[in-house]
Image (cartoon, rainbow, N blue to C red):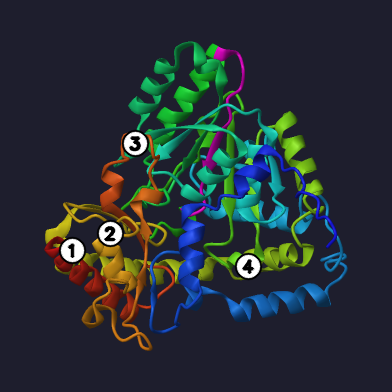
Amino acid sequence: MAHRPPAPSLSAYGEACLTTSPVNRMMAEFAVDFRDDVDINLGVGYVNEATLPRDGVRQGLDAVLQDPDHYRAALNYGGPTGSRNLLDSLRRWYLRHGPAGVDEGLLDTRHLLIGPNGATSLLESFSLLLELGIVFVADPLYYIYCDVLQRAGFELIAIPEDDEGLSAEGLRRAIDELSERAREIRFVYVVTVHNPTGTVMTNRRRTQIVDIVSDLSRRLDRQIPLLSDRAYEDLIHDDSLERPRSMMADDEIGIVYEIGTVSKTMAPALRIGFVIAPPGPLIGALAQRTSDAGFSAPLINQEISSWLLDHLIDEQVQSVNDGYRHKARCVGQWLHDRLGPHLQAVTGGQAGFYYYLTFAETTTTIGSAFSRYLSRTTGQVEIDGPLHQRHPRVVYIPGEFCVHPHGQLAEVGQRQLRLSYGFEELGQLDAAIGFMAEACAWSPSL
């Protein structure tokens, strides 16, 4: 037998990638035998299939292919900053329906760039382009991107959020406690409609955070980027909330990078994410990174998205928000009626499609009684069902995946979970909450 040489050497990042994230492991295991219309997915934050504009995408594709003069070379490679048509369409949309405080004068001072593969690809680009060091994030944290940052080698400092978003006082205190290590701070990352908690950051808090990071930049004599991820901001469906104000409106020194996407309102498969950025070397590096990753996002997707933004976006956003508002109200009532006695706190339900639950006593970790009941792995046939016909299973994101393992919320995270009401229809959501109530009642008996 021929000698087989050892495997190739991996970079530090490659070595980190050998350990898949807990969420990826959990979802991969569950997906192996997930049964559509039987098992219930409250975990993966997919948008609801009924909200996807299939006819609109078909119309957009036809319009793009039939007008090669306007949608030039739509089936070819694109440029690293994005389609001119899409950039213009996004600008018009932003001025009409974007956050408060944004006008043509502000946008004229900024650069708009399309990422290579959705908003996540832009976030990943920041992790590659900025020097390693300390990053401030909210706790509970956006586990997908925070996993990326940790694999890349960044040190995360997680600041607990309150009902207005990432705590301003907590951020100030954490900066002060770093003392001499403050020079290692690289950037601050906030999600304005937070994932996983669904907390909508108030305008007061946005201004406070811009002020804190601006003061820090002046003190260090170095711009500290403030990444404002507004992925769910177009899905604020609680009409009682104030119109969100862009962090760019309070940015006097060019530190705010506002990141958006059309995934939540139109279709994730289009993979269109964008950043509105101040001038400087970082935006130039982002453009080169996009080129390195494949020249640009697929140009046909960009042009279809441009057409959708010009022709269907207003009615699409209204329809999507009407649907999620109705689902949020139904799920919120069911949580109150069926899980109320077991819950200590609930956030979310005002924007996007998440509720974040904190139980008073029930442990939600993988392998807990609650988890085994919902995954039908208790070993009791009356709960699990016969081997060939398991009872419906429910997948959720446990809080242990959503909090910093060494942060202030590590303990309470053992009693938390994120529930997505985006993907499943009301009947499945109703059933899932009933199963959760059963799991709570069964758990203490062990």
Is residue 216 visible in the rendered image? The answer is: yes
The residue pinned by badge 2 equals 368
Alpha carbon of mark 4 to alpha carbon of mark 1: how far? Answer: 39 Å
**Which comes sooner in the sequence, label 4 or label 1?**
4
The residue pinned by badge 1 equals 443
* Main secondary-structure element of the magenta-colored stretch: loop
Three-letter amino acid code of the residue under disc 1: Ser
Task: State if disc 1 and disc 2 touch (CB < 8 Å).
Answer: yes
Q: Quadrant of residue 185?
A: top right
The residue lying at 43 percent from left, 35 percent from top is 206
Is residue 239 visible in the rendered image? The answer is: no
Task: State if disc 1 and disc 4 touch (CB < 8 Å).
Answer: no
Indicate the secondary structure of the residue bearing disc 2: loop
Above or below — where is 380 with respect to 123? below
Name the disc covering residue 171, or none.
none
Bounds of the magenta segment: 220-232
Task: State if disc 1 and disc 3 touch (CB < 8 Å).
Answer: no
Alpha carbon of mark 2 to alpha carbon of mark 1: how far? Answer: 8 Å
Closer to viewer: mark 4 or mark 1: 1
**Which comes sooner in the sequence, label 2 or label 1?**
2
